[in-house]
Image (spheres, rainbow, N blue to C red):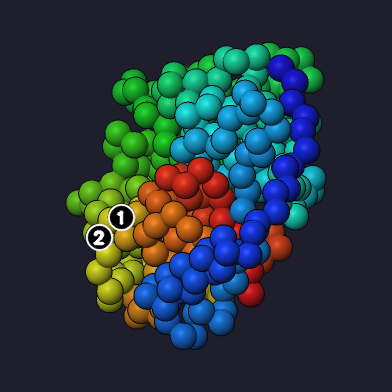
Amino acid sequence: MNWHKGKESRRGRGVSGLGLAASLFLLGLAVAVSPAAATSWQWQFSLKAPILKKDSKPMLMPAGLFVDPARKRYYVADTENNRLLSFTDKGEFLTFFDAGKRLQAPYDMIREAGGVLWVVEKGRNSLTRIDLKSRKLESKSLTWDGVDVIPHRLAEYGDAFYILDKKSGRILVYTKKLAQKNAYGVKGFRGFVDFKVRKDGIWGLERLTGTVFHLGHDGRVMRTIKPARSMSFPYALEIGPAGLVYLVDRHAGTVNVFDQSGAFKYRFLGAGHVRGRLSYPEEIMFDPWGRLCVVDSGNGRVEVFGR
């Protein structure tokens, strides 16, 4: 169960290829980005698996991103290849980890101090604990009031794990020993598809409608945000440092930005495969250095933007 080391490959590009890529990128921006947004967010780098030898695998259908500010590391769940990848805070590839080829469709993860990983494995429908020092892997099936849980998204806050149950659409809170602690939902809603936990409460994105609910840690609905601009398939959520709401439209490949009244501010990116385009994006988050990261599942990469 070792992290496998490697160096990031660097390949030059011809003038004609660079010119074509630049033209496509600028065309994409012209279609998908408002003038204000185009000068605001700039592409910084991509997190991608390097091709080091003939049997190297490119990243395939990445789903989850975890950022460790203390270690200055990005960790990406490379779902289809059953492994986790690590990168520096500058985007340089470091290692990959497959737990002795025992991981089964890792989807989301966190890393605790002391070298313990918690991984949502879709292949096992489990929350899996991996102790890197002892090299032990324990898969744990979760239940809530006797009913099986389908873990989807995972977050750590304080001394608890917050887990999005794909079956019920609720956000379930467990202690570090996986005892039931609390559950968050909204009466009559369709269930959450994504969430973020903050000091001021829990922010949840409702399935299909794009409605964002801001819940207090006591479960009380503090704010309901209904975006003024419709989206084809709202799928991922982030709350910006200034309180703006960032919503990923998975089918359109766009990031849509609203204020907390629901008023539309701008959108950027779009569907496609060149830089500045997304294909079935899975997740969005701000890293500790103020950069905006989008897990671009269909293109096998994580796109990182800065101002």
Residue 38 appears in the rendering: yes
Q: Quadrant of residue 7?
A: top right
Numbered badge on residue 151: none
Q: What residue is at 46 percent from the left and 67 percent from the top?
A: 24
Query: Where's residue 143, x and y in %?
Result: 39, 23
Q: What residue is at 74 percent from the left and 26 percent from the top?
A: 4
Q: Please identify the quadrant where the C terminus is shown.
A: bottom right
Q: What residue is at 71 percent from the left and 21 percent from the top?
A: 131
Q: Earlier in the sequence, mark 2 or mark 1?
A: 2
Numbered badge on residue 232: 2
Please state which of residues 3 and 279 is positioned toward the viewer in this rendering.
Answer: 279
Q: What residue is at 27 percent from the left and 64 percent from the top?
A: 231
Q: Identify residue type, mark 2.
A: Ser
Left or right: 148 as drawn, with respect to 138: left
Left or right: 304 as drawn, with respect to 276: right
Residue 215 appears in the rendering: no
Q: Identify residue type, mark 1.
A: His
Query: Where's residue 233, x and y in %?
Result: 28, 56
Left or right: 263 as drawn, with respect to 178: left
Please state which of residues 241 and 62 is positioned toward the viewer in this rendering.
Answer: 62
Q: Secondary structure under badge 2?
A: loop
Is 98 above or below relative to 26? Answer: above
Is 86 above or below relative to 276? Answer: above
Query: Where's residue 91, x and y in %?
Result: 71, 51
CB contact under 8 Å: marks 2 and 1: yes
Numbered badge on residue 251: 1
Q: Please identify the quadrant where the N terminus is shown.
A: top right
Between the residue at mark 2 and the residue at mark 1, the CA separation in whole angstroms equals 6 Å
Is 34 above or below relative to 79? Answer: below
Q: Quadrant of residue 253?
A: bottom left
